[in-house]
Image (cartoon, coloured by chain):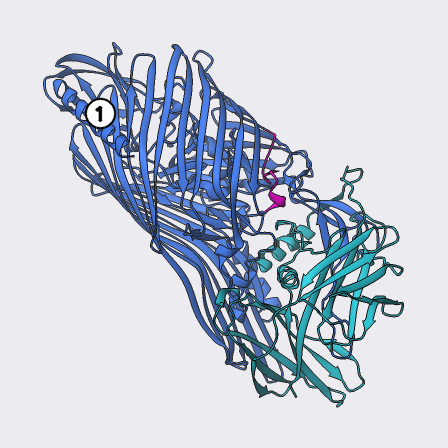
Chain colours: A blue, B cyan
Amino acid sequence: MNKFFLASLAVFATLALSAQETFTLSGYVQESGSKELLLGVTIYTEDKSAGTVSNNFGYYALKLPAGTHTVVYNFIGYQSVKKQVTIAKDEVLNIDLVSTNNEIGEVVVKGSRTQQKVSEEVQMSTIEVPIKTIKEIPAFMGEKDVLKVLQLMPGVQSGSEGQSGLYVRGGGPDQNLIILDGATVYNAQHLFGFFSLFNGDALRSVELIKGGFPAEYGGRLSSVIDMNMKDGNKEKYTGELGIGVISSKGVLEGPFAKGKGSFIVSGRRTYIDALTQPIILALNNGSGAGYYFYDFNAKANYKINDKNRVYLSGYFGRDKFYVNLNESFESQSYKSKVNFGWGNATSTARWNHIVNPELFSNTSLIYSFYELAIKAEEEENGSPLFSLQYGSGIRDFSLKQDFDWYANNNHKVKFGLLATHHTFTPDAVVLKDAVFGENLNRKTEYKSVESGLYIQDEWKISKRMKTLMGVRLSTFTSNSKTYVNPEPRIALSYKLQSDLAVKASYATMNQYVHLLSTSGVGLPTDLWVPATEKVKPQNSQQVAVGLAKDFEKQNFSLTVEGYYKTMNHIIGYKEGASFLAIQDGADGAESISWEDNITSGNGLSYGGEVLLQRKQGKLTGWVGYTLSWTTQQFDELNNGEKFYARYDRRHDISVVGVYELRDNITLSATWVYGTGNAITLPLSTYELGSLGSNQYGEQFGFYRNGNEYSSRNDFRMRAYHRADIGVQVSKEKKRGVRTWEFSAYNLYNRKNPFYYTIGPEERFNPDSKQVLKQISLFPILPSVSWNYKFN
Amino acid sequence: MNKLLIYTILVISLFSCQTVLDNVPVPEIPQKAVVFGSIEEGGTFHTLRVTKSKPIFSNSPSNEFEVIPNAAVTVTSGGNEYVYVFNSASQNYEYRGVIDIISGEASLKVETPTLGTLTSTVSAPAALDGYTLLVDSTERSFEKEYAVQFTLPASSNPAYYRIDGYVAYASDTFSSYSSNEYHTNEDVLDKELKIKTSFYNLSNEDGGSTDLYVRLSSISEDHYTYGKALVGYEPDNPFSEPTPLPNNVEGGLGIFGISRSVVIKLN
């Protein structure tokens, strides 16, 4: 481990010496009009002797010798800019790029970091989805969903019908690091996973990394989903309103302080309950029930001077079920109220500082919070009978410091530190029972500190070969147990031709937080807990190789990748384990240590992915195919035999197309296919007995059925496939653009399996023959939405 | 909380689409004999139930299982053999008399006509002595609540317990009204174990008297593991991992156990 860092420091020193012979041209690249900073802009001299790419904050630095140079700024979706510069000292040059978009009134940041040629990128296993595409692809009930679009990419699967959870290269949904402006989001789902927290309105970029992880990322085994919010329009006030079948939303952005700062706020809320609640209450004597969710994003940024910018962003979202019961008879009255809610809150304060033209600093203070809260109250004749408050959750405070060092044109070094203080609260109960006199006040809490120190270098070794190599040292301390793990990372790219590259990568990842889930669907009651002395951190090692080919004339790119990933100390639940006693501790049931209900094992996932993508032109979209195997082995499960993971999916196909029929009409369609999930089927049933008799000699007790099962997960559900279509029709209005969207989910009404069950052939005759039944959830679902963008 | 959400999803799915899947090739599994029963040490009446498993997709109603009435059921301990007799009224195998557990172990053998021979050997559970009992009661208009606490002496050996309760009506009929609760001293070895629970005696609207009993049993480890597994057992929950239940019967399925109980009348 020490050798890694000594070697890195030696490289560091060498770079420092060689950096002194040239001058630095630096500055920000932003979109003309909105002044949104542009990430991933390619900047190079016309003679191709030097080149660089703008960073996550739109900043670039290019080392040039003294003299006159023509510098080109190039970004897909924008007009290229050429500037002639004379270099005699360090110079600052900020550039505005004009969008080439010809859609009516579209003011969306279109470009992205990886929209340069795929054969130019050294990083592999990385997908960036343009926000515009997220808004064009037909969506479930018309609700645009970032995570569901990512599920259309090769190597990424959904768990089951309608779910937003991501299964990336054989890893479960707990193994994805989802970050929004640097803050971790722990439960990125509304309504049991049918909708995600992110609808794209306030987002600038979404990037998914499945392998070859840069050293700046850590903490999860299988993927990083890095999302950044827009900064807000610095020139004028703009906004958007949308009304859909499920929810309504709004966005407002604009400048302040004479353009030195800008802000953006967006919100979304379901409204069915708001419309129906008054009617329900009136018809039921004040009793009623409902459900809603809402999201709220906000961000503000301010340019203090040429070297300093500050940002403040936040997200707050919540789901809530509620039931109110009012009963009265003669002089007696009874009231009951149950609120069941869960949600996330994140906040990020950032300071960008240009230390010198070669060194860019980003300092972040980050807060992230997820909680589940249940409140139940009963009263009789105005007197309280019973009240229960139950909560669980996780709270993080983080400090993050990153440096981008443009040492020279062949080395772009990034280094930094992330330190996070976690507070895990698996359960907190306050119970007051006036009838039985039972009071309970209990809270289980774990505190831990996680850190990651990293250094990485994007090194252009030669004209043909590039590498992104680095190391991350991660640590985790909880209850006097400390884990220290070095995580080497390397990615290599070698250009066989100008538009064809072969790539390879290796990455070690460690995960110190575990998600306890007793169900196959993502429930808000799933608990985040830390690694402990008994339950070790999870660890993965992944190797990937691939080819990347650009077809420039046709605007296509093709990537083919193979991967092999081992996972160690993954957690599973001992057979017979139940977490209900933990969560139902309010009634005095015996408290069970979750650590004793956990068992650990190993996982293996390998396969191949193909992605053919077109990003420009009237017809855009992609075709993705994945062939993969995912197995697990636990000594305490399935008699120690290896078995397929529930989400092992042999074949996965996605076809996505967006066609601009005219300037104001866009057609879109998707088709997905996936091999069925692996499940465990009961094969026989038998009578269970009660093992007791009373003093009078009679054996009594309930009799239930027990099941004998096949080997774990050795039965396949039917294949899943579905087509969705959508059409968007826009019209320019006096003050903006109005768009109607019509879409249909599951166009040909395929009965896709949600789960299997065994029950009587005749639904209401329990004595009829037992058969296997498939439960399907969603038939063809049309939806319509109305949007208005005002300028 | 998990149950609330699971049931919500299941309710939603009631309004979804059900498709019967015909001709699905499902692996076959041999039919097995199933035995459940326990010896009450010091007791004079012991029962065992022997049935057959059946394929999951069968024509018979889901809750009906064929009893095996002509098996040879014997329990041996320390060289003594105890032969059970089938009672056609109760459909159970019964032994009336004391079964002496010698050398701390008893073995079961069930020879069935067509499903082979089942065997099981279990160790006697920890002795149930030296305990103290506290009982407190609260009278309400509709019921009487009894709070019960057993305190068991410290032990360095793991021990397993079940506590349950039942009512006996004046007409000599009985019903169990409380679920079994299972406890162990594994986490408090060398310390006292406190077992607390509550029982409720509902008022008898007919005015007849009822007797309320609490029973504390020291049970064998397999019996404890089985009882705990039943607590969260949801075989019909499509969203949880299927859980094979514990089984200590060779050649078949089921649980054979030994228990030592004290029964205390509360009222």
User: A195 left or right of B20?
Assistant: left
The residue at the point 31 percent across, 29 percent down is A470
Query: For the residue labelled by badge 1, is the local secondary structure a helix, a strand or a loop?
Result: helix
Position of residue B104 measured from the top left corner of the image (x, y, whole percent): 66, 67
Q: Main secondary structure of the magenta part?
A: loop
Judge whether A505 appears above or below A637 on screen. Answer: above
Q: Amino acid at mark 1?
A: Val
- Horizontally, is A198 left or right of A90 in the view? right
**Residue A252 location, x and y as percent?**
36, 44
Question: Crowding at label 1, few (<14), some or many (≥20) Cα neighbours within 10 Å?
Answer: few
Q: Residue at x 61, y 70 (%)?
A: B126
The residue closer to the viewer here, A238 or B90, is: B90
Q: Is residue B27 visible?
A: yes
Residue with the mark numbered 1: A11
| A641 drawn magenta | yes
Q: Is residue A210 visible?
A: no
| Rendered image quadrant of residue A495 | top left
Q: Chain of mark 1?
A: A
Q: Residue at x 86, y 60 (%)?
A: B72
Magenta residues (range): A637-651
